[in-house]
Image (cartoon, helix red, strand yellow):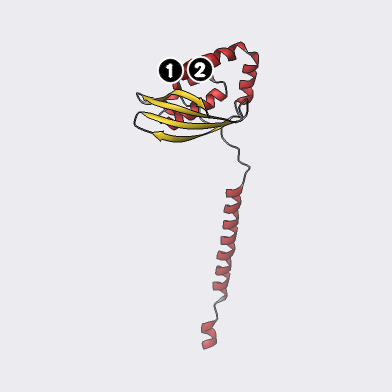
Amino acid sequence: MEDRLDSPKIQTLVLLSIVAVLTVILWGSAKLACNSKTASARPPLKLGSTELAKNPKDAAFELQQRWAMHDFSRVRALAKDKVLAELDQAARRCAEDRKCEKAREELEHGVKSTAALLSSTRTTAKVRVKTYGAEGGPQTYVLDMVKEGNLWKATSRQRE
């Protein structure tokens, strides 16, 4: 009698085997799906300045990223005072130079930036933005940001 109690039934062994095999298959497929690099990156959303300038870090990032890509028309909303004057000069130089238009197309997907908030109060902030892939190699700027209404705008841009 004791021999029959200690041994599992065949049905129990089959079901345990099925659960073990399914566990290994599902784990393997999940690991493969997570590590797959075949999915292409989606292009960034085209957002307006009001959505992009709600905090100082994002506003400084967008200003420097667009400036490096020579997208001067969209960056005007994020600049003020000295930065706006520098931006206008850069836009005029770009308009006079035919190479600038060609460079704009090439830089559209090659420029990458990172931003770090250095200090912040309710109405002012200081942000460091590093840009890679732009003309002239990597660039680092420190931008002084000021809150104007609900938007943040750059008032000073200094190369570090």
Secondary structure found at label 2: helix
Q: Classify residue 147 as left or right of residue 47.
A: left
Residue 36: give x, y in percent of width and height. 61, 46
Q: Which mark is residue 81?
A: 1
Residue identified by numbered label 2: 86
Residue 37: give x, y in percent of width and height. 62, 44
Separation (CA) of disc 1 from disc 2: 9 Å
Task: Compare marks 1 and 2 and give the one earlier in the sequence.
Answer: 1
In the picture shown, does residue 98 fall above or below 60?
above
Choose between 127 and 103: the one closer to the eye: 127
Secondary structure found at label 1: loop
Instruction: Report which quarter residue 140 is drawn in.
Output: top right
Label 1 crowd (10 A; few <14 / some 14-19 / many >=20): few
Instruction: Report which quarter residue 39 is drawn in.
Output: top right
In the picture shown, does residue 122 fall above or below 101?
below
What's the residue at 63%, 26% (across, down)? 136
Q: Work out which residue is located at the far bottom of the displayed protein and give it.
A: 1
- Name the amino acid type tagged 2: Glu
Label 2 crowd (10 A; few <14 / some 14-19 / many >=20): some
Q: Work out which residue is located at the far front of the displayed protein and give it.
A: 160
- Name the amino acid type tagged 1: Asp
Residue 135: give x, y in percent of width and height. 62, 25
